[in-house]
Image: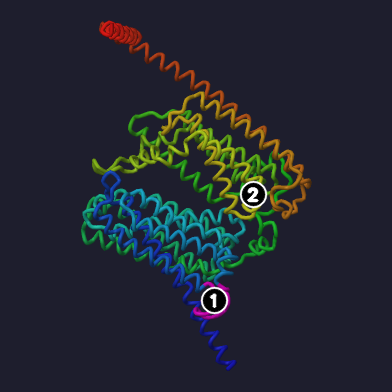
Amino acid sequence: MGLDAHNYIQNSNGVISVLIPTVKDFNLISALVVIGLLYAVGFLLVEQSGILSKESFRINAIALVASVIWILTTVVGALVEIAQLIGGSFFDAFDFRLLREFFATTSVGRGYIFQIVMGGIVISLISRARKVGAIYYALAITMLALLVPLFQSHAASAGNHGLAIGSLIFHVASASLWAGGVIGLVVITPTARNLAISRFSTLALWCAIIVVISGALNAWTRLNDLQGWHTLYGGAVLIKILLLLLLVVIGSKHRRHIVDNLQGTAQFLRLLINESVILIGAVAIGGWLSTVQPPASPSSIASAADPVVRIVGMPMPSQPTISRILLAYVPDGTVLGILILILALYVRGVLILSRRGDTWPVGRTVSFAIGISLVDFATSGGLGVYAHFAFSYHMLAHMTLGMIAPIGLVLGAPLTLALRTLPQGRTKDERGVRGTLIRIIHSRYSIIITNPIIALVLFDGSLFLLYMTPIFGKLMQSHSGHLLMDMHFLLAGYLFFYVIIGVDPNPRKIPHIVRIIVLLAAMSIHAFFSIALLSTTTLVDGGYFASLNRPWNLNLLADQHLGGAIGWAMGEIPILLALIATFIQWMRDDSRETRRIDRSADRAAAMGEDDELAKYNKYLATLADRDRQQFKEVD
């Protein structure tokens, strides 16, 4: 009986070891199919003023089936993961206690729950979609469900997990859109494909560049010595790189020759199918790599033994000095990738205007570049590095992200640049990318969040919610939490200054006096928060900074009070500058209105007509005559 049980366990483990990569591959491929079909409906197929076409409904039906398969493979993947953890069979995982413990107490289990919930939302959106907006939401949620679990992947244990996770996120996102676009082109009809090819070709070029760069960075973070490349893991990475290079070659051929010569032909379809097969092979290798621990190098072993690296993802830096703060750089791959992509799109927009013969103010470009540089300094530069180890430097980074960098980004007018350079619809009835952006700017959601009170609450009210509750300590414990804080600081600051001093189109016309009142309120609330932080007698980080045992700046409470003082000083100055800018804008608008009235009067005088004041006086005189006439009739 004991031998039978031993054989049963061995057989079960063998089945599970085969099931894990197989299920992951099916799960990833089904997710890619969902992404590709949603991308095809949202961006490749022609819509009519935002309403889906008949072809879109046909693709949506297929996407709905693929979404169900995606969720089912996610559930099976969770059960297989549990079976592997307990060393039993697949059916042993059907235990309520095990399921509850796995989903409630492990980060991997919570990742599965997140995917299942997001998948349910996607199914609901697809089944109810009548307009292209629902497809955009479904595509964004699908990408989110695919990317968020990467924070718990093997990359999170790498020596520089900021770069490892960031490169992996961009690698998966760009590869998913690339692969999904190919799948979408295969599924749609030849007639629709003819209009979609050029749009997909542009996306494929961007995705190919990102895939190659992010893949190389990710491989470097995992296999940072020559010995690692001689392992089975390194060999699989090399095969995947070769497959991706083959795809780049095919994509280049597609871009140069296929668009003009092979649209709607069997040869073009054959090329797409070949590209799909290679993509599926690359995805299968990627799915297998996600189940295998990368080979450990001496440096990675040393990093794993460092408790600070396990908590923060980087070793303890030396005591901060001006030179160390200015020269230190540990890239946060996620933020850095976003910044590079945004800057590349901004530069592309400026170049498009230049080719047209249009001009774009140099000051706006410089302002935007300064904002991007400040965000990078506060996340990956020396300020971002020391922000992980001391509250005072965290507050410096916070103020830079939320108060200073957004001013540069807002004055760079990225929305105006996008509206001037984004492509129009391919037909007279299609919104296109530019029309969609206009729709978003004037949507009900945009009208709500650009309310000055809402912007103020998000900007200043979130300070109390974050620092005066246990949320801050919990978010500091993980890279994803730190990333979430950085993104909130930046977006809340951008929204606030966009509402107050923005030069981009705004769905609300906010009087200058209201802007000044909001700025004064923001200054007061920020001062009150800083005083409250200066008055604290306990630490607000939930023990995070104490767990690092840093050898410098040992008085944690004094460092927290210093952070409050920094927040007060750095918070008041940008708001004061915004106040001055608001006064200047007010005077310019008044001057512009005065000139408009004067020009109108001059035109009226030149044509022998009365100016506006004379017309208004005549109107009042007409009203008075009518009143007198009415009184005479009564008498």
- The magenta-colored residue range is 81-98
Secondary structure of the residue carrying tag 2 is helix
Magenta stretch: includes residue 357: no
Q: How many marks can you see?
A: 2
Between 301 and 510, the residue placed more toward the observer is 510
Per the image, is 90 magenta? yes
Can you identify the residue that label 1 sits on?
95
Q: Do the residues labelled 1 and 2 touch (CB within 8 Å)?
A: no
Q: How crowded is mark 1: few (under 14 residues within 10 Å), some or many (20 or more)?
A: few
Query: Is the residue 329 above or below the residue 294 in the image?
Result: above
- Image position, residue 533 (x, y; %): 70, 40
Tag 1 secondary structure: loop
Earlier along the polypeptide chain: callout 1 or callout 2? 1
Looking at the rendered image, the disc whose residue lies closer to the viewer, 1 or 2, is 1
- Name the dominant secondary structure of the magenta segment: helix
Q: Which residue does the numbered mark 2 point to in the structure image?
A: 472
